[in-house]
Amino acid sequence: MKDCNKIVQPDIAVICDKDKINDKGCIGTPDFIVEITSKYNKAHDYITKLNLYNANKVREYWIVNPENKTIITYVLELENDNFSAPVAYTFNDKVKSSIFEALEIDFNELIL
């Protein structure tokens, strides 16, 4: 990411460019990030990380909230270089990635 003072560790990150990976982890912006909220610090995922990932052009960001069984997805829009309006799902839904055609998660089948 651009600013070394803004380093975070996502719960799940997909990095498509192997040149961004070294022995210390990912140097740069992952393509796809999934955060699983903590009941003690939800604002970090919903506000702080959302703004950081948007500013650093993460292509897709999912926030999974096991407590209320929801998933919110954001996709980077190429036209305006910002996240699209969020799309909300529940654990009863199958959620399909916008950037990876073959990725679809049936949250009803997961145990979180």
Image (cartoon, rainbow, N blue to C red):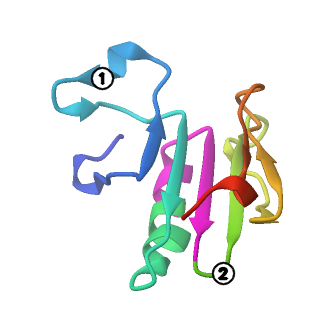
> Are there few (<14), some (14-19), or many (20+) residues within 10 Å of tag 2?
few
- In percent of the image, x 78 and y 26: which residue is there? 101
The residue type indicated by label 2 comes to Asn
- In percent of the image, x 45 and y 17: which residue is there? 17
- In percent of the image, x 52 and y 45: which residue is there? 33
Number of numbered discs: 2
Asked if 78 appears above or below 51 in the picture, the reply is above
Picture coordinates of residue 28, whole percent (x, y): 36, 32
Q: Is residue 70 left or right of residue 94?
A: left
For label 2, the residue is 68
The residue type indicated by label 1 comes to Ile
Image-quadrant location for residue 112: bottom right
Picture coordinates of residue 32, whole percent (x, y): 56, 39
For label 1, the residue is 21
Picture coordinates of residue 40, whole percent (x, y): 39, 85
First of labels 2, 1 by sequence position = 1
- In percent of the image, x 25 and y 33: which residue is there? 25
- Magenta highlight range: 51-66
Does the stretch in magenta take in 62?
yes
Asked if 100 appears above or below 37 in the picture, the reply is above
Quarter holding the N terminus is top left
Q: Residue 105 — which label?
A: none
Instruction: Give the farthest residue toward the bottom.
Output: 40
Separation of marks 2 and 1 at Cα, in angstroms: 34 Å
Q: Is residue 102 left or right of residue 38?
A: right
Q: Secondary structure at mark 2?
A: loop
